[in-house]
Each structure stands twice: as structure tokens, then as C-alpha cells.
Amino acid sequence: MAALLLALAGMARAELAIPLGESGDQLDVRVIEPPEGVSADGPLVLWVVNQYGDMAGPDSVAHALARRGATVWMVDVMDSLFLPRTDVNVRNVDGKPVGSLIQRAIEEDRPTVVVAADRMAVPTLRGMRWWQERTHDPDALAGAVLIFPSLYRGAPVAGEEPELFSIIDATNLPVMLFQPERGVYRHRLLDLRERFLQAGSDLFVQVIPGVRDYYHMHLEQPQLDSLDQLATVMEDPAEARAVQALPGDILRSIPLLAGADHPSTVRPIDPERTTPVDRQTGLQPVEPQEAPDFELTDLEGNPQGLDPDFDGVQIVNFWATWCPACVEEIPSMERLASRYPDQLKIYAIAFKQSPDHLREFMQDFDVSFPVPVDPDGQVAAKYDAFAFPSSFLVAADGRIHYSVNAGIIWDTEEVDAIVRELLEIEVE
């Protein structure tokens, strides 16, 4: 089917295999070349496919790049190495695969950039450093374009500061970062920028207005001839505009990156921060700390915030409709609330979502607790909410005693025991 779509689009498709040493492993490259009649003297774009594999959105953007004269090498590292597509496996990929890709690409002697999104940003930066250690010409690669990169070792205990992979502090080649305005990591952008700059990387940042993470992956059907009709096939007009702009954004990044500093000296890397951290699941006890107050408005127009005089437990939950685990836990959260109608308050704070969308979405749920809207994510940032959903249990003393950074079933015996503990009810 993919071959048929490519043929219909008039694009040349070629295959390229890049050996990875003497082990027999190789990278399988899909080459998307400019169509007939379009000059092929543009840049070489190395597109490191996301951990989820080939998708309609990135493929459509790659073909749009080819229509502008670029040649795109699409590489699915996980598929080439026969690795299961798990978060841990992605984050454990070392620099050799992407580094070997870069090493082969610069033989083409043309402006070259590597593009990656989400968790594949970490193997991509490792690959740049691997190549940097072996090259005599660091200027041969313009740099990397990272789209909503996930550069953290994993989700810590909810409320604790997440830790960046050490490759960030070991990257001094130039990077362009496309950060969605409504993305999960938007409020961490300044700190991330400072880390790159401290490492010596010329970091360029472009905030993509009105969209959230994965915006270019929400296209369901490939648009291989043109991106002009995206407004009719994508639900979100802002996402349609952002995807239409992405090929131009990438191409404009290349001269910026190429003109930046390309050090030949490789930065040292901290081996203690090269592996992902184990995800913390279930309610975790934390050192009690004052719960940040908030002033938000719920879907009925009522003001919502922590009640300082409430002699019970208050649960501050951060969620979003695009998060399956968030949605799955709503019914059990309501069942827990029904057990303690006078002793438990729940605030299901919706992260960066429109009230109109939420009202329609919540029609499928019968809940007694309010759904306040955190339109710019400032309250989530106060709580250092990193993963979604994240929840914080506030006791009558106004302090957070437990937290969880994943979806859970709320009406279990284990959770009930914790609630009773905080309510100082003797467990039978």
C-alpha cells in the first residue's frame, strides 16, 4: 500500500542499507527523492522515524520536503534493529545507529540535517555525538531539528523535578527545537535552553502556536501530493496550519544551523545519567509539603481552588482528554468520591484544553467533582506535574502527602487505606 501511494504521488522510491559494523545489523533507509521536474539540488534530510513507526503525518511532510527539492532518508531505527517499540528500548538506543546514518549521509556532500521527534530525540543527539567523535569535519552536518523532544530520563515521583539525560550536557553541536505552545514541556523550555547553552550548543527555538505535542502525527491519511487540503482532513485548524508550515520551518532551519558554531571537541558524558529511570506507579508517599493553591474556573463557570478550612482529603488531579490513562481512571475516581461524599474533594484539572471541547467530552461521564480548566498550564507547573495524569493527595493540614504520576484504579483497597489514613479513620 505504501509503495502504491508513493507511486501515485510521482515520487521516486529507493532503498539504501547502511551497515552497522561487523555484527550484520544494518539500517534500512527509505529514500524519498524530488519528483520529476523538480531540481534535486536541495538539502539531505535524515528523518529518524518516531518510536511508533511510519505514520501518515511525518510521511506527508517528508514528501512535501521532496517537492521543494530536498532528498529525505526515512529511517526506522527500532524496526531496523528488531527492537520492540517500548519507551525503555527507545531511550536505551546508543549513538551508533544514527551516527552511522550521519556518517554515510555526509558522503553525499550536500547540506545535511537530522530530524527527530519525541523520544527519538535522545538517540539522535547520541548519534550526533558518536559521529562528532569520529569526524574531522564537524561542519559537514548542519545540526539537528528536534520536534517536541522528550529529553528526560523518565517520570519521577509526581511533584519531583525530572532529570535530563546526560546527552543534553554533552551536546555542543547546533540544535533547532520546535516547541508546541500547548505542549507538556512548554514551561520547562527556558531551563532546557539554558542546559543546551551551558553545554556549548547554539540552540535555536521556535514555539509553534496553538498546538500540542504530536501535532504532525495527528494526520490519519497520507497527503503525498499536496498539503493544501489539510484544513479539510484535520480536526484542529491550528494543527493543520502548523503541519503545512513544517516543511518550510525545517528548510529555513538548515542555514541557521549550518552557520552556527560546530566544535570539534567532544563534550564528556556522565555515565550515571545515560539510562532511563524506572517509572513510579501507584500512590507514593512524599515528604509532606505545602500544596500550591490555585484559582481556576470549572465548566459551570464556578471558581475552584483548594479549601483551606476543609477537614478532609483533597485530590488535585491533572489530566487531558488526549491522554487514554487519564480518561480510564475517571470512573474509578468517581466511585472513590462517592464513598466519602463529605470527607473527600476532587479537582480534575484539565491541562491546556478548551472549555467547549471539555463540555462535549464530559457528556459521556457522570461525575460529581468539578473540572477546572488550566488554560496555560500554570497550575500544573506549580505542582511540577510531569506526566499525565498526575495526582496529589492533600491532607487536612494543607500539605501533599501522596502523589502518583500515572493512571490508577482509585477505588481499590490500597487507595482506600491511604485515604482513610489521611482522614485518620481506623482501618478495619
Image (tube, grey):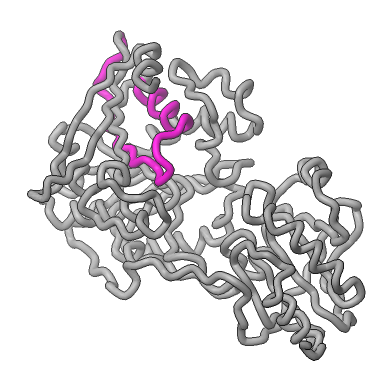
At which x and y percent is residue 55? 45, 33
The stretch of residues the image draws in magenta is 37-66
Residue 385 location, quadrant: bottom right
Residue 351 location, quadrant: bottom right
At which x and y percent is residue 142? 27, 42
The number of discs equals 0
Residue 331 location, quadrant: bottom right
Farthest residue toward the left? 22
Up-down relation of residue 288 to residue 356 (above or below): below
Farthest residue toward the front? 428
**The N terminus appears in which quarter of the rendering?**
top left
At which x and y percent is residue 48? 33, 41
Is residue 378 visible in the rendered structure shown here?
yes
Residue 53 magenta: yes
**The C terminus appears in which quarter of the rendering?**
bottom right
Up-down relation of residue 72 to residue 171 (above or below): above
Q: Residue at x 26, y 19 (%)?
A: 40
Closer to the camera, 275 or 179?
275
At which x and y percent is residue 258? 28, 42
Q: Residue at x 32, y 40 (%)?
A: 76
- Left or right: 406 in relation to 33: right
Q: Residue at x 13, y 42 (%)?
A: 19
Closer to the camera, 295 or 197?
295
